[in-house]
Image: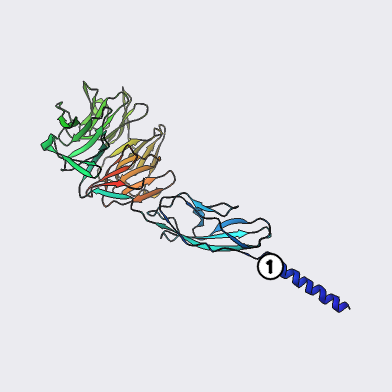
Amino acid sequence: MRKFLYLVLCLSFFIFSCKKDELVSFTINEINDTIIDENISYNSIEPIIIGNPIGVVTYSLEGTDSEIFNINSSTGVVSINTLNYESPQDENKDNIYELSIRATDSEGNYDIEDWTLTVNNLVEWVNILENEDVYAITEDSQGKIWFGGYFFGIAILDGSNWAYLNTVDGLYSDVVRSLYKDSEDKIWIGTQEGLNYYENGAINKIQTNLVGSSVSSITQDLDNDLWFATYSGIERFNGLNWNHFDELNGINDDFIEEVATDQNGIVWIATINGISSYDGNTWTNYVGLYDFSANELDDEYIPSLMIDSDNNLWAITWGGGVLKYDGMNWSQITMDDGLSSNFGRAILEDDNGNILVGTTAGVSTYNGEFWTNEWLGSQIRCLFKDSEGTIWAGTKENGAFKYSNK
């Protein structure tokens, strides 16, 4: 009798154990490998549990490339803001991210499912003006995009149609270094040999003898005065009178590449020997901003600068990467931080607050966290944002490009 009871107890325990094992047996349904386009956010589907987990199931992420992803521990949804094909973050640098999701119940029972996420490359920059050296880009009041460059004068894009302007039409030179639309929709054209403007369908010549005939940059300040940077100083025009500023007035150097105005009305200029600013009365100079020993010019050359939406000054250097000035402190960003090259000629901010830098190795874009880089076949001469927020780039010898993935 005692043997019988013992056998009954053993059998009951065996049956109970089998049922318990059956209750806690669960798996994660197969997760298919996924392909997504670059530069868009990713959210996975909720994993499906098959079987009978005990209590609450929580999710965690494992795998070679899991650290840059986020996971909702309650739903198991995996997400990431964006992934850029040109700057892969996976361990193998092949844009194939290896992930594993672990589901664990209240008793510590778990299952793991593996899958991959592949990032697809997109054609983001479209060449629309091939084999030209493009120095400047602007937009007129009708939405036409103007391109100025080396010995082709001006090319105007109207949808898919092109028109051209050159010395026959009244330009001082077919080498156009700067373009600017003012507050009255007049297009100012800085050529290698003088200053023109386009109004009412015609090109006009400015007869005033600028001290520097090669006009490298143009802007308009808060008082609607126009500023024309040259390689022999800078000119201010209030609609009636011209004022010339150069080293004798306190500027770093007469060789000026860029002029911009900040939100406080301060005029900033990029020279071959640092940066200068003008508050309406006094010029202030900024030098010693970067080590220029690598640029072979023996000068602290600043090819371009701009003011962002937060009134910070950004400048691209010739050998020292990017400089940022917040009104109190200067900081420096170089190739060590992800920039494509420490040499560049253009910089701007897009509508999303990203900083784009045109370097000798293409376009570098900073989203506030990391840099992504795109080679356009040649060094970048200029960058421009039109009224719709579309970005345009001019290159040294590969024409102009339109960013098609706005």
Q: Residue furthest right?
A: 1
Picture colour scheme? rainbow
- 10 relative to 165, above or below: below
Q: Quadrant of the N terminus?
A: bottom right
Q: Amino acid at mark 1?
A: Glu
- Which residue sits at x=41%, y=44%? 367
Indicate whether 191 appears above or below 110. Answer: above
Horizontally, is 188 left or right of 61 in the view? left
Return the x and y of residue 78 as percentages of the image width and height: 52, 54
Residue at the limit of the structure toward the left, as seen here? 168
Image x and y of residue 110, in percent: 62, 62
Residue 101 quadrant? bottom right
> 154 or 357: which is nearer to us?
154
Q: Position of residue 83 (x, y in %)?
A: 43, 52
Q: Would you say residue 292 is visible in this rendering?
A: no
Observer able to see residue 340? yes
Which picture quadrant has residue 160? top left
Mark 1 neighbour density, 10 Å: few (under 14) some (14–19) many (20 or more): few
Decide which of 263, 48 is in the foreground and name it: 48
Q: Nearer the viewer, residue 276 or 168?
A: 168
Left or right, 307 with reference to 74: left
Which picture quadrant has residue 279? top left
Q: Residue furthest top?
A: 240
Query: Residue 205's x, y, as percent?
Result: 15, 29
Secondary structure state at the residue bearing disc 1: helix
Q: How many marks?
A: 1
Image position of 62 with respect to 203: above or below = below
Left or right of residue 48: residue 394:
left
Image quadrant where one finds the C terminus: top left
Residue on which disc 1 sits: 22
